[in-house]
Image (cartoon, rainbow, N blue to C red):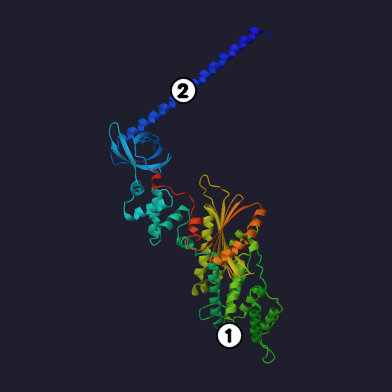
Amino acid sequence: MNIQNFFTSLSANQNLRQTADLTAKDSIQAHKVSESSGREQALENGTKLLKEMLAGDIFDAKLLSMKDGTALLELSDGSMVNAKMQARDGLMAGQTLTYMLESNSDNNISIKVMNPDLQQNVLLDKALSSAGFANNEANRAIVNSLLEQNMPIDAKTIGDMVKNSLRFPETKLSTLANLQKLNLPINENNIASFEAYQSYEHTISGELDNFSQALNSLSDSILTGTQEGNSENGVDIGKFSSLIEDLYEGLDGQSIESSGLEDYLDQAEIKDLSDLLREVGGNDTAPAKNEWANQLADKLDNKDLSLKDLLSQLAEHFDNEDLKAKLGSSLGQVKEKLLKSMVDETMKLKPQDVAEDDGIKNYYKRVRSSLEHITKDLADEAKNLNLSKNLDNIKSNIDFMNDLNKNNMAYVQIPIHYKENNANGELYVYTNKRKTAGQDSDTVSALLHLDMDNLGPVDVYVKLAGKNLSTNFCLETEELLDFINDNIDKLTARLEAKGYQTKFEMHLSNDENKFDVAKEVLDVNESKVAAGQFMLDVKV
C-alpha cells in the first residue's frame, strides 16, 4: 500500500466533509434567517393592520401563544400581532376566537377576548351584513339556528334558510336547518317525518299497526254494504281480494309464504271460527246453502288452512248475508286479529330474514311496491276511509329513510314480527357517513326496541367499535332490571366466546335516557364549536 497516497486521500476526504458541514450549517442558518425574516414581516403586517383599526373594533384571530400577558395572534390573512391581553381560564393555543381592540397607541396594542354572548351578537350582525340581509329579529333567529347546527353562515346558506322559512312559516327553524344540513328535500312529508322521528313517534311498526286498523275499517264498510257489490260508502267488495293479493306479492313474481292459522289464533278462537262457518254453511236441520263455508270449516279443523287462504276465501264471500252478520258481530274481534296478523306477516320481517344478503333492502323495495299497488287499486276507497293518508305516511317514511341513507348515514328501521311470543320490535342501525377527523370509522351503533307481553317495552342500545361491545338496557321496572342482571352472564359468555370484549349497563327508562333519533341518528355528530370559531373576513 502507498502510505503517501493513503494520507493524501484521507486529507481530501476530510476537506470534503468539512466543506459539506459548512454548507449544511450555512443552509440551516439561511433557513433560520428566512424564517425570522418572514415572522418579522408577518408581525409588521399584522401591527399595521391593527394600527388602522379603532378602539372597539372586532376581529377574529388564532391564538398562537400566551406568555407574561402578551398574546401572539395570527390573523385570517396570515399576518401576526403581539398584543397585551389578560389571561383567562380556558384559553389554549390553537383556538380561533373573536377579540375586541381595547386601546391602540404607538407602542401599545391592548385587546380582550369577547364573552360568548357578545361574540354571538357580533357574529350575527357580521353574517347578516356580509350576506346582504336586514338585521331584524327573524333573520337573526335564522342565523342563530344555523350556528346551533354547526352550519356555515354564508350568503347562500342564509338565503336558502330565509326562503324555506317563508315557504313553511309554521315549521321550527331547527327542523329546516337540520333538513338543509342533511341535504334532504324540504317538503311537507320530510318535515313531518323529521319532527315525528324526533319525538319517536313516526315508526314503521306504528304506521303498519295503523294500516291494519284501516283495513279493519275497510272490511267493516264492506260488510255493511249491499248485495249488489257496493256499500253505501262506495267500497267495491271485489277489491278486498285484490288488496290481499297485493300484500302477499313478493319480488320477481314470488309470493310471500303464509303460515297456518294456529300461529295466529288460539284453539278456542279457531273453534269459534269453525262453528261460525258451519252455521253459515248449513247442517242437518238447515239445508246446506253455502257449501264453501263447510269446506272451509273442514280445513280449519284439519289444520290445513293458511292465513292467506282463509282471508282470501272470506273476502270472496263478503256479500253473503249470513257471513256478514256473523263477522260483523260475534267474531268481530277475531276478524280484526286476522287482519292485523296479515299485515304483520306480509309487511314485517321475520328475525331470520334480517341476516339474509340484501334482505332489508329487498324488504323495503317489496313493501314500497305493495303500497303502490294498493294505492292504485283502492284509490276511491282509500279517500273515503282516510286510508290514503296512512298509505302516504308509510311511503313517505320509507322515502325519507332512503334519502337519509344516500349521503348521511346507514340508518334503517327493521320492523320485526315474533310469532312465538307475540312481540313486535324495531331495530335501528346507524353509522355516520360524515365522520369527523379522528373518529373510528368502524364504529356502528344500534337500537333494538321491543314491545313484549312479559317484559313490556325494552330498549337495548349497542355500540360496537372493533371487538369492543358496549350495551345499555333500558327497562320499565326494577324487577326487570334484576331479571336481566341475573341472566346477563349467559349473554356475556356467548359474546366473549366469539371474541368480543363486553360492557353492560342497565337503567330504568325515563326522559333523560330515552332514545333521541335526532340526536343519535339524524345528527352528523360533529362537535359543537364556539361561535367565534366561525371565521369571517373583517374589513378595516
Asked whether 516 or 498 is in front, the reply is 498
The quarter of the displayed image where residue 169 is located: bottom left
Asked whether 15 or 538 is in front, the reply is 15
Q: Residue 537: x and y, percent? A: 37, 41
Q: Local crowd at mark 1 within 10 Å, few (<14), some, or many (≥20)?
A: some
Q: In this figure, which residue is indicated by the disc labeled 2?
A: 29
Amino acid identity at mark 2: Gln
Give the structural element (helix, strand or loop) at label 1. helix
Q: Local crowd at mark 2 within 10 Å, few (<14), some, or many (≥20)?
A: few
Q: In this figure, which residue is indicated by the disc labeled 1?
A: 325
Residue 372 visible in the snapshot: no
The quarter of the displayed image where residue 36 is located: top left
Rendered image: mark on residue 30: none
Question: What residue lies at 33% left-to-right and 33% top-to-bottom?
Answer: 47
* Residue lying at the far right of the rendered structure: 302
Residue 23 visible in the snapshot: yes
Decide: is 271 above or below 99: below
Q: Which quadrant of the figure contains the N terminus?
A: top right
Q: Which quadrant of the figure contains the C terminus?
A: top left
Amino acid identity at mark 1: Ala
Q: Is residue 522 left or right of residue 291?
A: left
